[in-house]
Image (cartoon, rainbow, N blue to C red):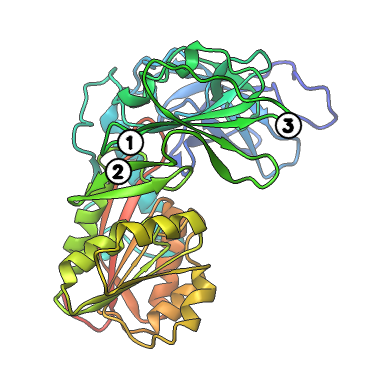
């Protein structure tokens, strides 16, 4: 089945429609199908086993693959539900990938993606990675089909030409106007960002700290625009992104929010990284500490340490004779980490890129390592350096299973194997997962 293409550009297949059988889920929030000619389709808004009409959204004749949306469901999966969010679906908000899938099916598909990445990039089965295949929901996120957990404590709104706040459409700069984001935490929703005029703003970020009543709004104005007077439904601190230096500067209120995790309060500066799900920080600290089993007096590294979440947890467990070195590239994050960890005299935080700073430290051996790299992962050079330090255990926290699997392969080259892997669904309705892999020297027995 084919329709007339909506794009008249020579060779473009945008707008073409194909009736296809949907195959397995793939990394990135879509499923795989093939046209009768054998061309691969990455189809959003579909589920494995369905028969759908897929409309091409990107691609041209001869391309290795095409992107498409399922615009008509001819034979539905038993895992399909009507998307609870009115802004989800083909051509609409791109924030959620799986609004149309039951919660259990979402976690199962995420597990299948992790397993496929492990096999393809690291050559490991789930059993060989010490993983039972389960993707665990965060505490409080087990909701019936048709309900949506309100988990996102930080929401980046785009602003359209008329000053209305909304969210970007999938792989587009176009703004989908919304009146409410269903996955936004209650503390974000109560700010009423969608209700007011944001003319002149490029974006508005709303932050609702999970560990305090702190609320913050970060405004990014268009070039030359003046900041509006922000009068929201409750007191907030207001920050702005400077168009010249890109820095975040205080307009009103304190320049940070206070988050709580592992029994400690952490200062997180404006624009600084903190886990978005309110239960994520505690969930990940627990998984990391259970995997590492820190001992009094040990030496540990916390790489890509942010504001010091894992460094503080390690220092607390290593005791007065233990020591922790954290490395973080962000200047503001380093300032926050040093503030947050000031009561630990044997914790040191260095600023700079891990691959540059770590070799300069002169450290030749450590007992424990935690690394929580950005989405691209740590990379071959950094992994090789870490493997040379002889840590008895390494905890790798990853938001991208592909980068994790690739780096696990590099660790294997350096003499390490995966002892256990745990996978957490800390981003319901999206394709994202968080993984914690515990590695140890390959010669060590179970």
**Dot 2 lies on which element?**
strand
Q: Which residue is mark 1?
A: 209
Q: Count neighbours of disc 3 (C-alpha within 10 A) and say few if under 14, some if 14 to 19, many if 20 or more.
A: few
Task: Report the Cα–Cα distance between label 1 and label 3.
Answer: 29 Å
How far apart are the two marked residues, 1 and 2, measured between alpha carbons?
6 Å
Pointer 2: residues within 10 angstroms few (<14), some, or many (20+)?
Answer: many
Where residue 171 appears, as percent x and y from the top left, is 61, 33
Q: Quadrant of residue 167?
A: top right
Q: Secondary structure at mark 1?
A: loop
Q: 252 above or below 400? A: above
Residue drawn at x 21%, y 79% as measured from the top left? 298
Dot 1 or dot 3, earlier in sequence: 1
Answer yes or no: is residue 381 visible: no
Find out whether the residues at labels 1 and 2 contact each other: C-beta distance under 8 Å.
yes
Give the side of residue 283 with respect to residue 353, left or right. left
Relative side of 416 to 335, left or right: left
Evaluate if marks 3 and 2 touch, with contact meaning CB atoms under 8 Å apart. no
């Amino acid at each position: 089945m084919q329709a007339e293409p909506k794009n008249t550009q020579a060779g473009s297949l945008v707008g073409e429609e194909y009736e296809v059988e949907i195959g397995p889920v793939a990394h990135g929030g879509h499923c795989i199908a093939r046209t009768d000619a054998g061309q691969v389709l990455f189809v959003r808004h579909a589920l494995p086993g369905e028969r759908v009409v897929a409309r091409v959204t990107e691609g041209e004749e001869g391309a290795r693959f095409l992107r498409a949306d399922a615009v008509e469901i001819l034979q539905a999966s038993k895992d399909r539900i009507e998307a609870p969010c009115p802004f989800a679906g083909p051509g609409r908000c791109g924030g959620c990938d799986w609004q149309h899938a039951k919660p259990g099916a979402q976690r199962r598909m995420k597990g299948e993606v992790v397993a496929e990445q492990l096999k393809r990039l690291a050559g490991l089965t789930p059993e060989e990675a010490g993983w039972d295949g389960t993707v665990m929901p965060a505490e409080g996120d087990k909701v019936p089909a048709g309900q949506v957990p309100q988990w996102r404590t930080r929401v980046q709104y785009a602003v359209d030409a008329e000053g209305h706040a909304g969210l970007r459409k999938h792989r587009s700069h176009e703004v989908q106007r919304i009146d409410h984001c269903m996955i936004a935490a209650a503390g974000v929703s109560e700010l009423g960002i969608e209700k007011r005029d944001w003319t002149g703003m490029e974006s508005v970020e709303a932050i609702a700290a999970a560990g305090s009543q702190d609320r913050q709004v970060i405004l990014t104005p268009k070039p030359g625009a003046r900041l509006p007077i922000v009068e929201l439904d409750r007191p907030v601190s207001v920050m702005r992104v400077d168009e010249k230096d890109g820095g975040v500067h205080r307009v009103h209120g304190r320049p940070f929010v206070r988050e709580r995790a592992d029994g400690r309060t952490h200062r997180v500066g404006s624009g600084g990284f903190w886990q978005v799900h309110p239960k994520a920080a505690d969930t990940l600290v627990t998984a990391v500490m259970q995997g590492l089993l820190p001992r009094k007096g040990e030496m540990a590294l916390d790489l890509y340490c942010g504001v010091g979440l894992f460094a503080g947890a390690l220092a607390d467990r290593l005791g007065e004779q233990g020591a922790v070195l954290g490395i973080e590239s962000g200047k503001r994050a380093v300032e926050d980490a040093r503030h947050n960890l000031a009561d630990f005299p044997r914790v040191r935080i260095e600023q700079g890129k891990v691959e540059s700073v770590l070799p300069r430290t002169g450290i030749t051996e450590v007992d424990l390592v935690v690394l929580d790299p950005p989405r691209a992962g740590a990379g071959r050079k950094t992994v090789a350096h870490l493997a040379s330090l002889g840590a008895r255990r390494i905890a790798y926290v990853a938001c991208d299973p592909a980068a994790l699997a690739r780096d696990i392969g590099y660790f294997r080259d350096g003499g390490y194997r995966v002892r256990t892997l745990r996978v957490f669904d800390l981003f319901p309705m999206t394709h994202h997962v968080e993984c914690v892999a515990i590695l140890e020297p390959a010669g060590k027995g179970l």
